[in-house]
Amino acid sequence: MAQIYRPAPRRKTTQQQWLRDAKVVGLDHQGRGVIRTSKGVRFVAGALPEEVVDVVPKGKWDAELRTLKTTSEQRCQADCRYYERCGGCDLQHLHLAAQRQHKQQVVSELFAKFAEHEISTWLPPLTAAAWRYRRRLRLACHWDAKRKKLKLGLRQANSKTIVEINDCLVTQTSLTQLFAPLRELLPQLNLVNQLGHVELLSSTTNCVILRVKSWPNKDDSQQLKAFADRHNVDVWLHSDDGPPRPLNKQQELPKYRSWQSELAFQPGDFLQAHAELSEAMVAQAVAWLAPQRDEKILELYAGSGNFSLPIALQGAQVTAIEGVASMVDRLRYNAQQYALTIDARQADLEQNWQAYEWAQTRYQKVFLDPARAGAANAIKEVAQRRPQRIVYVSCAPDTLARDAKQLFNAGYRLVQAQIVDMFPQTHHIECLTWFEREA
């Protein structure tokens, strides 16, 4: 007998379900207020420590802020008119200095929890512009074929709902100025009904990347080329049959600035969102690494060379390991532009390193910049080889703390740590750490 699924009817929130006069006792690692109830902890987006709030429980752990009874001195008015609906920023209601203090505290707490270590060597955070800093932005889109209407914007938090926006205060103006022209262009294209998302990038040239299922037909291509000429942008298409490709096959790869260098990249490659702080972070990492001429340095998760080239420009012998073959190719290309000899290799760093010839060399120093998953296997392999110095850049403090424990257990000490406020107005954290092997 066939069973037909019927969703449970939604229950209306009654006044009895409200949790009233709840005291916010802190912020969690995602910037949500923490309240304690008779039935356990609840996390409340938009609430700040010391505030008294009325909330409505949602799910097992969360609660929705309904009434703010008392206001924290750290609270400020969010500047963005879309803030309460858009899922992009989540800390605009917290003063900027308090945001940075909170992020440093999160790293300290996670080190205490996962690495069983107290950080006492903090440097002041690396900071720069807190608005108009983003040089890349992905816009969600939906085409309503019946109404012939395109929705273009950012998604609500934990939702597929698209919030249509006319501006984004954390994104560079050269990109937000493209919102209106894109809204006019895209509905005129045949490919609009297969459009997945639109990505905007600012580099030596502004790029518009369209995620589509197949290459555009002749009419669409002509309209896209006219749009590119009119707005001085490069158009790229990312279809199901491979990586992004330029609409104009003769155009050069865009470039971005790193410290003391300029690197070619392809849309789809990883690129730090904050251009100014990306350069500052590279400069700080290189200063901590202190490369010496002819010194052998191993770099892991090297990408297209954001750190590799600045390290090699100091005269060190760099072996750069990256998992994505196309990124290795671009790293080699970028090194050639500066006549640098960088030994760039492709390798899966989460596999045993015994089969890798480069892993049998003795390196004085190691630099790594992994993705959010961290470097669970790689850090064990590094610790076994006992380099004198390790500089670790992380965008996920929980996995950083986990990996740091391996280094502490292997006889390393934490020399310095520093927050990089790469993502102002959000809870996301970038952190620089320097480890030294004890004699």
Image (tube, rainbow, N blue to C red):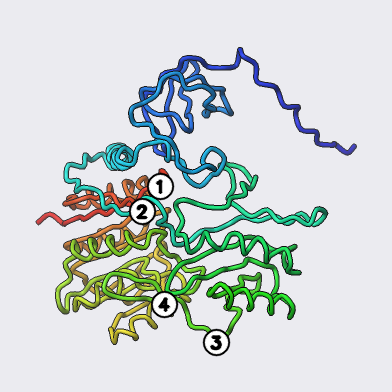
Residue 273, given in percent of the width and then of the height, sits at 42, 59
Label 2, label 1: how far apart the Cα atoms are: 8 Å
Residue 94 — which label? none
Q: Earlier in the sequence, mark 3 or mark 2?
A: 3
For mark 1, does the 10 Å Cα neighbourhood hold few (<14), some (14 to 19), or many (20 or more) residues? some
Q: Earlier in the sequence, mark 3 or mark 1?
A: 3
Q: Which image quadrant is residue 294 in?
A: bottom left
Q: Are marks 3 and 1 in contact (CB under 8 Å)?
A: no
The amino acid type found where label 2 is placed reads Met
Residue 159, given in percent of the width and then of the height, sits at 61, 43
Q: Nearer the viewer, residue 30 or 206?
A: 206
The kind of secondary structure element at disc 3 is loop
* Rendered position, 122 above or below 135: above
Q: Are marks 2 and 1 in contact (CB under 8 Å)?
A: yes
Label 3, label 2: how far apart the Cα atoms are: 34 Å
* Rendered position, 395 above or below 86: below
Residue 271 is left or right of residue 167, and the answer is left
Residue 422 — which label? 2
Residue 250 — which label? 3
Outermost residue, top side: 16
Q: Which residue is mark 1?
A: 428
Label 3, label 1: how far apart the Cα atoms are: 38 Å
Q: Nearer the viewer, residue 293 or 365?
A: 293
Residue 56, given in percent of the width and then of the height, sits at 56, 22
* Rendered position, 217 above or below 410: below
Q: Earlier in the sequence, mark 2 or mark 4?
A: 4
- Is residue 111 at all visible to an observer of this figure? no
